[in-house]
Amino acid sequence: MLDIEKRPVSDQVLIYFRKKIMRQEFKEGEHLKEHLLSQKLNVSRGPIREAISKLEGEGLVFRNSNGRAIVQKFGESDIHHLYESRILLENYSLASIQPELLEQNGHLLYEYLNQMEMFNGTGMNVEADIQFHYCLVKMTGNKTLIRLWWSLNEIIKTLIEVTSEFASKRQKEIILEHKVIVDAIFDKDIEKAQQLLRVHLEGASDYYSKAVFKFQEGK
């Protein structure tokens, strides 16, 4: 049974399905049967249908000629494509940061770093990590860019969550990678910050790909 929180039921169902697909617990080609999933999760079919529709938009599910919702493979190439997109958006963001917004909000970057360092839970502080990168994008003041980045946020957040056990093994390294990016920003060396960000996100892409591959192999 699904644990119901304050957030909309359809959002909880969506996250549940995403994680199942990423962990290969829903296999490629599997038919997502609304009535069975509704019974299993003890929720009505409306949230199930809404979640499946959003998964279609994310490329994790497709509708065949009979209208059945079929699970798509989520593999290493998908992760690399996600992170290539992030690199493009975030490196553009670094070059577009507005000085007044950096002055107003730049301190938040160090606060998110502190939250990562002080985190006592299992795995990584996913929320602090996400907010760190979101802050970089928000400081451009570019609403279109912010919307584009945010459209990738939920699937990336879920990916980080399902692989946090693996990422926790290099937590100190990840925090340091964030810190040197911030230092370069405040040193006004944007080219260096972009290079560091690329290395950081390419490393994350490789690491998460290996973690997902382990799920696929059942390790």
Image (tube, rainbow, N blue to C red):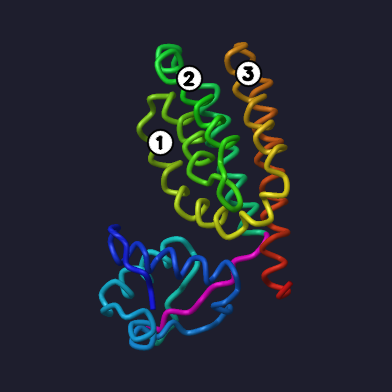
Disc 3 is placed on an element classified as helix
Q: On residue 146, which mark appears?
A: 1
* Res 196 quadrant in image: top right
Disc 3 versus disc 2: nearer the observer: 2
Residue 196 vs residue 132, the one in the foreground = 132
Find the distance from the CA under tag 2 to the CA under tag 1: 19 Å
Question: Where does the image place residue 82, in percent across and percent down from the top left?
Answer: 57, 51
Amino acid type, residue under disc 1 in the picture: Ile
Query: Which residue does the image show at 62% across and 57% down from the upper left?
Result: 163
Q: Amino acid at mark 3?
A: Asp
Residue 167 position (above or below residue 162): above
Q: Which mark is residue 107?
A: 2
Vertical order, 172 against 219 (above or below): above
Nearer to us of marks 3 and 1 is 3
Q: Position of residue 34 (x, y in %)?
A: 35, 83
Left or right, 13 with respect to 106, comes to: left
